[in-house]
Amino acid sequence: MSDKKTCPHCSERKKERTPEEKKNLLKRLKLAEGQIRGIQNMVENNAWCPDILIQVSAVTAALNSFNKELLGCHIKSCVSDDIRAGNNEAIDDFVKVLQKLMK
């Protein structure tokens, strides 16, 4: 095990979430899941390509919304707690995550 400090919320690469946080995140994922099932049905039923593309765009928006929610939670808990604890590596780690998200 390394001696790198880890966020108490994210140790062991897990994070305890509040019931409200979990509810909000799962709600967004279930919305995207339903939209994807709808797209599958559209493909099976030979829907018009532009209609499918519009639905794919809606799924992308739903997943972006999920990412924004999760990112906000991560900043408010894990990143800020690490910085307060003197783990300035958290900033570099966070920047890496943002770079991956913005590909």
Image (cartoon, rainbow, N blue to C red):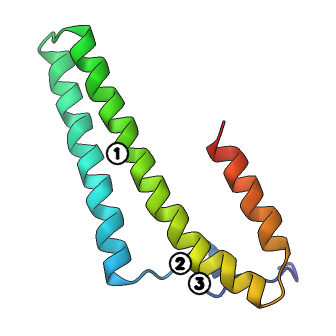
Q: Earlier in the sequence, mark 3 or mark 1?
A: 3
- Residue at 31 percent across and 56 percent down: it is 28
Residue 15 tag number: 2
Residue 10 in sight from this viewpoint = no
On the image, the x and y values in percent for residue 80 come to 67, 80
Q: Earlier in the sequence, mark 3 or mark 2?
A: 3
Give the SS element for disc 3: loop
- Kindly report the distance in space between the C-alpha atoms of the residues bearing marks 3 and 2: 5 Å
Quarter-of-image position of residue 5: bottom right
Circle 1 is placed at which residue position?
A: 62
- Mark 1 closeness class: few <14, some 14–19, many ≥20 residues within 10 Å: some
On the image, the x and y values in percent for residue 13 come to 62, 72
Marks 3/2 in contact by CB < 8 Å: the verdict is: yes
Q: Nearer the viewer, residue 10 or 53?
A: 53
Q: Earlier in the sequence, mark 2 or mark 1?
A: 2
Q: Mark 1 is on which residue type?
A: Ala
Residue 9 tag number: 3
